[in-house]
Each structure stands twice: as structure tokens, then as C-alpha cells.
Amino acid sequence: MLDESPKRFDRIIAILIQLQSKRIVKAQELADRFEVSLRTIYRDIRSLESSGVPIYGEAGVGYSLVDGYRLPPVMFTREEASSFIAAEKLMQTFIDKELGQHYASAMFKLKSVLQNSDKDWVSTIESKVLIQQPTGKLFNENVPDAMTILFKSIADKTQVKLLYQAYEAEETSERIIEPVGIFHDNNNWYVFGFCHLRNDYRQFRADRIQGISKTAIPFSKEHNSLETYLNKQNECPTTRVVLLVNKKIAKYLSNEKKYHGFISKKTIGENVEMTFLSRDIENAFPRWLLMFADYTTIIEPQRLKDRTLELLETYKEHLLK
């Protein structure tokens, strides 16, 4: 008996879209994507053919649609289509597994409306674009659907339950939060929201989320935009820091200096005077400074000098053990 379930119907439609996304599609490629047998794929292809879809199949090659058959009406220029490539590569690298699968499905639909010559053109570029994996994990691999659940929570205005591993905590804690938004900063993804445990707004790093589940409980209050809260965070007390950095090292700090409150610089002989408004001169800033301390003079404040010396003394003790 044929399986006419909604799941099969969705798969057949997805197969049709994928057939339109490239010139030739192998049966094994379809079987791998939908996690079904080759026999099931052959049956689905026959169903499409019996519905009037003009499919051409060649043993050992694959399936293709008769040229000219496509779903109307969206069309893209080559330049528009090529812009999808960078987005697709970024999404594959910088989002969690489930959202990545949804995006891949969306890309098949976008590519399906291209002319065959444009598909070849896009495929040529696609094979020449590579985005390296980040050095750290952006998401907990045991929680592959974190962003999908958070997106749904934000849209539906319902609370989510997190199992969260704080940086210095030995055990995970349960948090009920009302997500306000998601943002990427300093090579990490964060969710910002109202935490019922702390009765205040907090941000949570995505890779420290050990578990997540959506609830049907509506938000307990109205929340402002994400930008509103992030701007308030930027208004927290800061300390003015002035460094004198050797020119040949200063040019390598451009990627990280903004995360430490950089505001200006000026050249003084063979050095660059760099000014910062730091939010943390006790830990984050001096630890970053130690990476290039032998090429740097601390002009101010005195507390940063003292704290850097404290860290060096601690490290010296460890070396001498």
C-alpha cells in the first residue's frame, strides 16, 4: 500500500524543488537528504511523472527536468543569485544544525528558479568559495536546535527553559527566560533576555546552553528592542586607558581593539598612542594586554599597571613551581 501521508507529500514537493535547483540530481543524493531508501526515491519520482512533471532519467547519471519546465514566477539575475553563495556558506558555518537545515531547504527553492545556464554559473562560483570553521564552538553540538527554538520563542512571545552552564559554575542551572533578541559579538552568539531566576535582564552565550525547550507560557511583560538594552550595557562605567604601542604591533590589533573600548589613536614617532574606554581593567583588558606587553607602555591608569604586574607575578609563581 502506498504511503500517502503528509510527510511523503512534503518530500515529493521538496524533490521537485531540488530537481529545479540544479541540472542533474542523483537518486542517492535525494535518498541521503531525506534519509529514505533508493526504492522510496524511485517511487516518489514515478509519482511526480504520473502527475505530469516531465522528468528525464538516465541510469548511472541521474534525474533532470525537461528544460523549460519550472515553477513560476520568481526569477533572479546572475548577480543576485551569486549573492546567495556567500550567505549560504556563512549560514553553514555560523548557525546551529537545525536552522542550517532549514536554510539549506530554502536555498534549494531559490536555486530552483534559475535557468540551467545560470545554475552552472552559480555552481562554478560556489565550488570556489570557502569559509573556514571558527576556532571555538559557536553552539553546543548536543543542542542542535537552539536558535530555531529561540526564534520561535521571540516570534510567539513565549518563555523558554534553559539548562545553562555559567562560566565559573561547576553545575548547570535551570533558567526560565523571555528572549528579547539574539546577537553575535566577539566571535560568539548570545541570547539576551529577561531571566526569572535573577529577576533582571541577562545575556547567555549560545555554546554554554546545555539544554533548551520551548514552553507555552506567555511573556510576563513587554520588552523593548534588543538595541535598547545593548546600548544601555554600553553606557556602563568605563575607565580611560592610554597605551603607547610599537607601530609594527599596533597594526595587528585592529581586529580585537574594538572589543576593548578603542576610541582613538595618534602616531608618535615609532609608536602609536591608543586610547580606550575599558569596561574591565581588572581582567579582560590586562589579560589581552599581556599578549603584546613587551611592545607596549601603559601611560594610564596606574591601576592597570598594578593589575598587570599582579598577573605577571602570579604567572611567575606558576613557572617556578
Image (spheres, grey):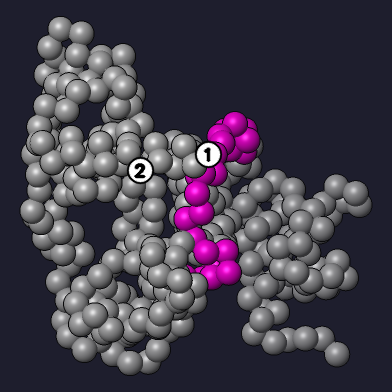
Examine the rendering and report whether any part of residue 251 can be seen: no
Q: Is residue 128 above or below residue 271?
A: below
Q: Residue at x 49, y 72 (%)?
A: 210
The amino acid at mark 2 is Thr
Q: Which residues are magenta?
A: 121-147
Q: Residue at x 78, y 64 (%)?
A: 31
Quarter where residue 303 is shown: top left
Indicate yes or no whether the magenta region holds residue 135. yes
Give the mark nearest the N terminus, 1 or 2.
1
The numbered dot on residue 314 is: 2
Examine the rendering and report whether any part of residue 223 can be seen: yes
**How far apart are the two marked residues, 1 and 2, measured between alpha carbons?**
39 Å
The numbered dot on residue 165 is: none
Locate residue 155, reporting x and y percent: 32, 76
Q: Residues within 10 Å of mark 1 (few under 14, many from 20)?
A: few
Quarter where residue 14 is shown: bottom right
Residue toward you, 6 or 188: 188
Of all residues, the one furthest to the bottom in this rendering is 217
Q: Residue at x 9, y 44 (%)?
A: 239
The amino acid at mark 1 is Ile
Q: Secondary structure at mark 2?
A: helix
Locate residue 131, reporting x and y percent: 53, 39
Left or right: 23 with respect to 256?
right
The numbered dot on residue 131 is: 1
Left or right: 277 with respect to 190?
left
Q: Residues within 10 Å of mark 2 (few under 14, many from 20)?
A: few
Of all residues, the one furthest to the right in this rendering is 59
Q: Secondary structure at mark 1?
A: loop
Q: Is residue 32 above or below residue 194?
A: above
